Image (cartoon, grey):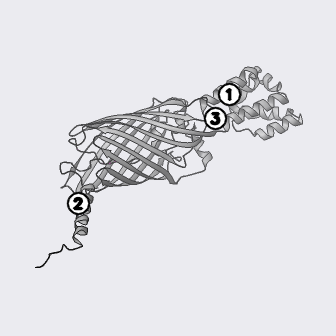
Amino acid sequence: MHTHRRAPHKPLLLALAASLTALTTMVTTPASAKPFKNGDLFAGRSVRPDTTDQFFDFGLKFSIAPVNAIIKAVVKKELDSYAKENPEAAAMQEYLQYADTEQMRALANSGDLDKYKAALKEEMTKQGATLSPEQTAAIDAIDSAKLKTIADMVDIMNDPDDTLTFSLSPWVAVNFKHLRIRADIAIAGFSSDQLDMPSLQLGNLGLEFSTGSSHGAAGAAFGWTVGVRGWAPTGTDDSNLLALANVSAAPRFFHEYATVSPFAIVGMDFTFLQWSLHGEYVHMVAVREGQTALNDMAYVQAGSGLLLYMKWIGVSLELDGMFDIKNADAMGGTWLFTGGVRGYLGPVNVGLGVQVPLAKPGSDDAYFTAGGLATGSPAAVNVLLDAKMRF
């Protein structure tokens, strides 16, 4: 009589088979899903999803970054306070933006003010001012104490503090068979030691139209999208603080400009891996007269994104470059890397990403005036969070 013994390796083989089955389930999408479902990226663009997978969706994009920025509202409050008691300083503040404040204080301490007063009158004349009798009298009345006060005012105007900036961008979209329409509103926020509480500023209003299609069987599909996006100049003064914190989002916050941006995207969907290549021409036209030194700015933003899609989790890597076409020195030459993770649970899509500049043009000081406008500087790191629901 022989006893049959089960092969000792059989349980191991069964466990291995079960693990492979589970892994296959994770990295494949349901058979009913169309290509490019859940293809969202953090910085770049992705191919338009099929209307059967996503007809109506809405969400919120949030980013946060520390930058150096001049908060106009705070500066104005400080200057108004000085001006009440020092009308002589208030009358000349617009001519003193680049004054050497250390030299001013040294002159005040030396008591030799006549040379400074003469030089100030000459500089104001060079800048196009016709000195009124009141202005001349105000300059002649400057004493040591008032000169130190003027130096303090110049420092307030030109010495930005570290500011924690954040942006909120709620949006909504409808995806018809041949047309997708999306509306955004940008909100700029900032907090610093100068503020009693965080401040919010309205950014620009955006509207986008796009169309596209996908071709091929599941697992090897090709897709394309073309469209145009516009930003209306609805922002308030301090929204410019975020115009360069995340350079790729500049049109959302430059409130002096209206923007038109045609774009195109192509991509491949290999079920568990999506790849896309996008390009966008951005043209910004000044519409608020007298507030900017440039009538228009233009640049191209182009990049590529990879998305590893594992049913409930997506991991994305993105590279974006910006190329100056006209008057866009603050944008051209910038390269950005963005990496992030997303979670998919039914109609809910939540993502957390980090963006860092790999290259940026010019010096930090150059960013404080882009097109003659006061702005913040590019952030060393942007933390990106977005959430959406789709139906």
Q: Are marks 3 and 2 in contact (CB under 8 Å)?
A: no
**Can the viewer see residue 96?**
no
The N terminus, quarter of image = bottom left
Q: Based on the displayed image, in which of its 4 quarters is residue 306 positioned?
A: bottom left
Tag 3: Cα neighbours inside 10 Å, few (<14), some, or many (≥20)? few
**Can the viewer see residue 122?**
yes
Measure how far apart labels 1 and 2 are at the Cα level. Answer: 67 Å
Q: Main secondary structure of the magenta part?
A: loop
Rendering coords of residue 22 (x, y %)? 25, 58
Q: Residue furthest bottom?
A: 1
Q: Based on the displayed image, in which of its 4 quarters is residue 268 positioned?
A: bottom left
Q: Which residues are magenta?
A: 45-51
Q: What amino acid is found at the position of numbered circle 2 in the picture? A: Thr
Q: Residue at x 76, y 31 (%)?
A: 150
Q: Residue at x 80, y 28 (%)?
A: 146
Which element carries disc 3, helix, strand or loop?
Answer: loop
In the figure, 226 relative to 241: above or below?
A: below
Q: What amino acid is found at the position of numbered circle 1 in the picture? A: Glu
Residues 57 and 158: in front is 57
